Image (cartoon, rainbow, N blue to C red):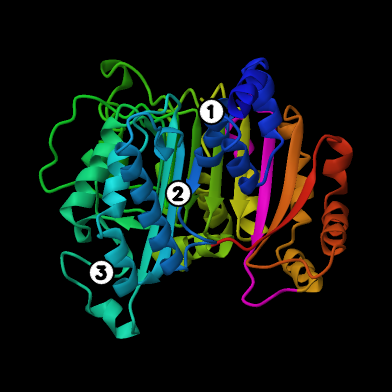
Amino acid sequence: MMTSARDNTTQNLPVEILESIFDEVSIASVFSSIALASRTLRSIANNRRFRSLVLNRGVGHDIHFTSKKIKTLANLIRDAENFSKMRSIVDFTTSLSLSMIGYYDEVTPVINSGSLAFIFQHIFRATPSECSLSLRIYRWARTDDEYFDDISEYPKYNGLSWRSINSDLRTSLRSLIQTSKLTRLTLHTMNHVPIDLLKSANIKHLHLLRAKLDLGRRPTPITHPILLESLQMDPILSVEEIDSLTYPYRLGEDRSTLGGYLPLVKLTVAISYRGALDLLNRLLQYTLALRSLTVELRMTSGMLLNSFARTLSPESISIGEMRRLIDNHCTINWSNLSHLESVSLQARDSGIARDLTRTLPMCGIPSSLSTISFTIIYHPYSLPSVADVITFLEQSRINGLDGYLTLSAFNAVPSIHIAIRVEWAQPSSGSDIDILEKFVRGQIPLLLKQKPASKVHIEYTTSF
């Protein structure tokens, strides 16, 4: 009778009100208790409890914890199969994340045990929502020498190789990507990924982070493209890889004969060499619907200058001509992106950011652009003090951005934001961020006066 009374009480409340109440709950154990109260509340509580599953602790170094969690989830799915009236945990799941970083002889038995393959066979099938999968598996050798000895076709170390996982896991992962309701896929440090694995009509958001694709010795013709809405490449893919991914929207062919352009609205790329900028500009010619562009510049202005110096004779070219060459190559050709709303440029020093700032107006700034963000990244070798960060910014001549960003070419852009990201560090006191923000503001007074909507942001990151 008590259960029936509770059910009647909750049934009198609209579902929207119950869900609004549950949205205020942030402690997982509370959901567990609520789920025991009544059948009505159980469904709503389980949706909150199991909507997003993370199978690792922290960044994934605790292999024993991750292994236990994978086995537990697989067993719970099996238990639900034995009770026809019981909804499985994965019926509520719309996001699954797995990160494992450890020694080869600890990681490999876990991924090939059969439990992970079993989970992949059942997840993202019943839920009506769009689903997300993130995989990051990295394996260490016990000694440094082993890394160099691992030259077999089935590599054991570094990023997880598609070739080194067993056939059951390959089959289940392929089925998950191509036949489930998966719409967002992140592959981190995975090697030899078959290009046809990603040929899923459901994938709308693809993130390839230090992942290497395998085009195959004899690629089979694909009659449909991946109609991606967002694509992240770190590093940027080769022409052949992008060409294969985007078939039939081939980068080297006439758009009019192929029925359109790439449907991307969001693009994120990492640039680590001079030719990668040329590749990005080539790609931008076919992304006319693009609304958001993020470019991380891993090279510095010095690296760019050295790349020209290695290919040109110093005696045959003047400094002015060298600068013009850099200007022609260190730019982003965005003039045809009439829907572009936001651009984020991230750099390891402000020198390359200044080069871009100087050359961007040459291509014509889209009138649709409302925000440009510049992020200067400081990656110290040891725990930095506030003084260390300020010294880095002074040496990078961050104040040079002030003159370029206040040029008339940028007048139509309502806001230009400046951010400083200190990686692998934490502020030593609560005042560190305030001190750094005040310093940065002092370096860009003209910009802040000309564009009051502009912001300065300081962040410390400790993530892998």
Total labels drawn = 3
Label 3 to label 1, Cα distance in Å?
Answer: 48 Å
Could you tell which of marks 2 and 3 lies nearer the N-terminus?
Answer: 2
Residue carrying label 3: 156
Q: Which of the pair 210/190 is nearer the observer?
A: 190
Amino acid type shown at disc 1 = Arg
Q: Is residue 188 visible?
A: no
Left/right placement of residue 293 relative to residue 195 reads right
- Numbered disc in front, either 2 or 3: 2
Q: Which residues are magenta?
A: 359-384
Question: In percent of the image, x 83 and y 64: which residue is there?
Answer: 432
Answer with the quarter of the image where residue 291 lies.
top right
Residue that protrudes farthest toward the left in the picture: 218
Instruction: Provide the secondary structure element on which disc 1 rests.
Output: helix
- The local crowd at label 3, few if under 14, some if 14 to 19, many if 20 or more residues have their Cα within 10 Å, is many
Left/right placement of residue 405 relative to residue 209 reads right
- The local crowd at label 2, few if under 14, some if 14 to 19, many if 20 or more residues have their Cα within 10 Å, is some
Q: Percent from the top left, x then y, of residue 106? A: 33, 72
Query: Do the residues bearing badges 2 and 3 touch, measured as CB atoms within 8 Å?
Result: no
Question: In percent of the image, x 49 and y 23: which residue is there?
Answer: 289
Amino acid type shown at disc 2 = Ser
Instruction: Provide the secondary structure element on which disc 3 rests.
Output: loop
Q: Is residue 108 visible?
A: yes
Quarter holding the N terminus is top right
Residue carrying label 1: 39
Question: In percent of the image, x 82 and y 59: which residue is there?
Answer: 433
Amino acid type shown at disc 3 = Lys
Label 2 to label 1, Cα distance in Å?
Answer: 28 Å
Question: In percent of the image, x 49 and y 37: which residue is there?
Answer: 267
Residue carrying label 2: 97
Q: Which of the pair 379/251 is nearer the observer?
A: 379
